[in-house]
Amino acid sequence: MVAYCNFQIQPYAANNTFGPTADCVYFFTPSILSGLLLTVLLLAITSWGIAMIMGIHTMDRFDDPKGKPLFIGSTE
């Protein structure tokens, strides 16, 4: 957050004049960084979900309405 005021302090000022000011503004602000992290998280969740959906295998054998019914026994 930048505060705008008419007060300036600079050590070792020559001839009682101030040199060029340097604004300490970072390239990655907290909002940009959180947006990038959220995007990476959502992309990871989406890619994991797509990989899980692509991993679903269908049955190799289906019921034939004219033939013997398919029976899958349980071993409990």
Image (spheres, rainbow, N blue to C red):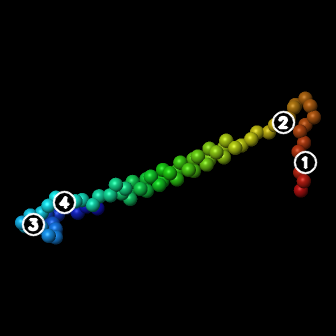
Of labels 1 and 2, the one closer to you: 2
Q: Earlier in the sequence, mark 3 or mark 2?
A: 3
Q: Nearer the viewer, mark 3 or mark 2?
A: 3
The residue that disc 3 covers is: 14
Q: Are marks 2 and 4 in contact (CB under 8 Å)?
A: no
Kindly check if marks 1 and 4 are in contact, taking CB atoms under 8 A apart as contact: no
Residue 72, given in percent of the width and then of the height, sits at 88, 45
Please, is residue 49 above or below residue 13 in the view?
above
- Mark 4 packing: few (<14 Cα in 10 Å), some, or many (20+)? few
Give the amino acid type for the residue marked by disc 1 in the picture.
Answer: Gly
Identity of the residue furthest to the top in this view: 66
Q: Give how far apart the Cα atoms at labels 3 and 2 are.
A: 89 Å
Q: In the image, which disc is placed on residue 52?
A: none
Q: Which of pointers 2 and 4 lies earlier in the amino acid sequence?
A: 4
Q: Which residue is mark 4?
A: 21
Kindly report the distance in space between the C-alpha atoms of the residues bearing marks 1 and 4: 80 Å
Give amino acid for label 4.
Answer: Thr
Residue identified by numbered label 2: 61
Image location (x, y in percent) of residue 70: 89, 39
Please tell me in which quadrant of the rendered image residue 67 appears: top right
Q: CA distance from mark 3 to mark 1?
A: 93 Å
Alpha-carbon span between mark 1 and mark 2: 15 Å
Q: Secondary structure at mark 1?
A: loop
The reply, left or right, for residue 72 in relation to residue 40 is right
> Callout 3: few (<14), some (14-19), or many (20+) C-alpha neighbours within 10 Å?
few
Q: Which of the marked residues, 3 or 4, is nearer the chain's N terminus?
A: 3
Residue beneath label 1, please? 73
